[in-house]
Amino acid sequence: MNNATQHSQVNDKQRTAPHAEIAVRPANVSALAAELSAAIEGEVRFDDGSRAVYATDASNYRQAPIGVVLPKNVDDVVKTVALCRKHGAPITARGGGTSLAGQCCNIAVVIDFSKYMHHVLELDPYRRRAKVQPGANLDTLRRQAEQYHLTFGPDPATHDHNTLGGMIGNNSCGVHSVMAQFYGPGPLTVDSIESLEILTYDGLRLTVGVTSEEELSRIINEGGQRGEIYAGLKALRDCYADQIRTKYPDIPRRVSGYNLDRLLPEHNFNVAGALVGSEGTCVIVLSATLKLMPNPAVRSLLVLGYPDAYHAGDHIMEVLEHKPVGLEGIDQALIGYMKKKHMHPEDVEMLPDGGGWLLVEFGGDNKEDADNKAQKLMDELKKKDDAPSMKLFDDKEQEHHIWLVRESGLGATANVPGMSPTHPGWEDAAVPPEKVGPYLRDFRKLLNEFGYQCALYGHFGQGCIHCRIDFDLLTADGVKKYLAFIDKAADLVISYGGSLSGEHGDGQARSMLLPKMYGEELVGAFREFKKIWDPGWKMNPGKVIDSYRPDENLRMGPHYNPPPVKARFGYPDDDGSFAKATARCVGVGMCRRVDSGVMCPSYMATREEAYSTRGRARLLFEMLQGDIVADGWRDRRIHDALDWCLACKGCKHDCPVNVDMATYKAEFMSHYYRYRLRSRHEYAMGLIYWWSRAALKLPLLTNFFTQHEPFAFIIKKIGGIASERRLPPFTKQTFRDWFQQRQSNRPNKPRVILWPDTFSNHFLPEPAKAAVEVLEAAGYQVELPPRPLCCGRPLYDIGMLDLAKKLWRQTLTALQSEITAGTPIVGLEPSCVAAFRDELINLFPNDYNARRLSQQTMLLSSFLRKIDYRPPKLRRQALVHAHCNHRAIMGMKAEEALLNRLGLDYELMDSGCCGMAGAFGFSEKKYDISIKIGERVLLPAVRNAAQSTLVITNGFSCREQISQTTGRRALHLAEVLALALREGKQPSSDDDPEFNVCSRPRHPAFSLKGSGEIFNEKDN
């Protein structure tokens, strides 16, 4: 609160539009924050860090808010609005923050509904209705509705991380709006709204929906604030009814402007409908009652290939005659971008021949029913002279992968190698479906006229075309060119009877163009509509009506000039620029998923925006700008946000634009701690390589102290380790010692280097011993590096990059001859192999030997797949958890191939992160979050698995988390392969196979009991 004066000032980069004056005086900001904190149960954040996190959405725009409120209930919202009204503060309601037109950023008090008010309140399958809070996620609702074979029709690409409040604000649509059009209430969100519970800035709380003429008269006659509003709406309707009927495009995707048509008698004076799509400029939605529709039991996907996207657009209507549940289009440029970015390479190859494709989905009661509908369309198309290529997918997994190609549109078109940056701004126009082909041809001519490039994809079945265009927003001339382009683009889409926006709304990006589409009189009606609800112009001011210009508040406009950074990493994918790396995030918000994927475990556990990949990227971006976050590399808020990053690297894989937060964290920490001491925990865990080597001299004595009380408690206290954790005991004989003592002579066999990581060498040598057995069975001579080495994996999280580089130089020197010879190097710990693949070349981008070593190093599964190893069959059931680094950097295809060859009946869980993540889960301050992350999927699944089911995961941290919380011993793939070799010689019916795979003891969950047995137990 020390920067209250600075908070309320609007700098020259954020000039206000008419009716958007900031009414909060500098002295009032502190008072507003204090009164909010005292009044509500939720969270009040007016600090610089929070303002930085919420300064932008997924658009081109940036406006730092006055502060942020996270309400826990409706009463909190009511009190927040009342206090904002008292102090004259504008309000912006925010859901998922994925808006592409600037609706979710403003110089206002931002109310974020997604952290606490995210519940489905009611679901009535008989009436097909659901009541939700504004922060509820669409997929959360759909999963509950699916139990009754119901769904919510509109489903934008953000379905797994958006909010329904945001969908209501934007009037969203999505892939299956075609299904909602043919089989449900209609294609738009507005069609699926029964009623809204709303709150005005003046404090009026009411429920709105359809209103009969009799009820309308009664409400007006009752008077009061409600009566005045309804009287104003009726007068507005009566005055502009004829213009509304003639000037509103009659197309499936008319989203631009306010829904004044919903006030017409033919729509039963639907006040809720009129407010849908108003982008938070009129009221706040407190809850919504939604209409559900039947969900097809089975679906079939037919892909049609045409010479180009234009020809695909020409054939929309003949496909629509068959009433599919989905009809999407993609062009050759999108596929080209995907190939450049190595996105879904195998999936792209599944497409039929062509240069433009239609993805046609049919629903049915069973597979035969759905396939028959697809076949009927195919039979009809085959009769035509210009019949497309066709491919009907009968495999559910293949269908899923094809849909991934389409859903990757935004990610594929952002940050394309060799291309200038692309931006939203004209990404959402819609035309009549029958005119898609001609429109696309004319649109491409316009793009060529301006020298712009983009891929074309989107909801072709409803005439809505998506694209990201390589606008130059960094120079004044580029911005002028951009403004000239959107002006002509608007003329073009209007000439086709279309809408400026078909899904994403107007916000700031398109509002200036509304007079072109509707004329000045109807825009005046929009102004009157807003004034009826918000006479003080305090609800999301400067958006939709009397808005900021499209070239104001640009996040990366002509003013953008980040300072040069002497970075520790090379950032080869970002032209060596840390600033470019931090700007990689485009705000799509996939890191806000809570039910699937790896990214982002800290957000999944906390729903804290600053702990999402996007939130952290925003903080780092703002750090370089320096006007909100002023402390640079020493900023505590950024440190705290990154400190809770598990460095799982899930974002590098799951994020559509491959943000690499683990690397950015390491970079920041290296600067933050320059000339500073780190925490006890960071020294205790970060230097584990050296502590382990020291313990090697007296392992029994070390184990005595680490495994017995009160010594263990004291050691954990000194090291900042959670008291609930059990310190893993050191092995009595290291793997290197075991290897050097064993008798093995395999001359004339090809050589392979086995990398003995710190954990395999000093703590758990069984996987390494098993790997030797398997590699020798595969016909190889196994050798170790000539001296103890370390990849420095624990050092990156805490920013000890100079020490990490020193370790890499040792490795490059020690392995020089093997690198030159091209000897394969096999690693067992996924995080270590990931360091070879990722950190090594990022720290040494111009070192050829570093690149060679990176390419030569692989996981055991990758090596065995490469040599086409055929293991003996192992007829067992298994539960498989992928280590985060494994999934993100190396991928799981080799692992799955080997498990399939084993003949295992296995489930590869979508379990995300285990929660241990190296040192993270041992930290006393992070223990609770570590457990919460693990309990999301992994740990309950392990507990529920039969004792005879193998639990397989390659990460030491993952196995330790499982051991300490479930009592089960998870196995490394090497141990499973060794088990197959042994059972191939002597079959076993053991119902507890993990007990006899290795000599490790079974540990009771959350217990320090038995430490004496651990210390005294002899090897089997």
Image (spheres, rainbow, N blue to C red):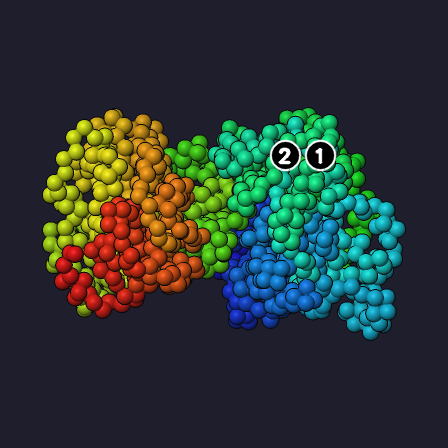
Which image quadrant is residue 462 in? top right
Residue 488 drawn at (x, y percent): 73, 33
Which badge, 1 or 2, comes first in the chain's sequence? 1
Kind of residue sitting beneath label 2: Met
Q: Which mark is residue 390?
A: 2
Q: Residue at x 45, y 39 (%)?
A: 581
Relative vertical location of residue 969 with respect to residue 675 in this rendering, above or below: below
How crowded pointer 2 is (Cα within 10 Å; few <14, some 14-19, many 20+) is rated as many
Q: Are marks 1 and 2 in contact (CB under 8 Å)?
A: yes
Q: Give the left or right position of residue 196, taking residue 685 as reference.
A: right
Residue marked by disc 1 = 381
Binning the other alpha carbons within 10 Å of mark 1 as few (below 14), some (14 to 19) or many (20 upward) gives: some
Measured in 3D between alpha carbons, the distance from the residue under mark 1 to the one under mark 2, in whole angstroms, is: 9 Å
Q: Quadrant of the C terminus?
A: bottom left
Residue at x-position 59% and y-position 47%: 157
**Numbered mark located on residue 918 in the image:** none
In the rendering, at what x and y percent does residue 973 appear? 31, 47
Q: Nearer the viewer, residue 69 or 22?
A: 69
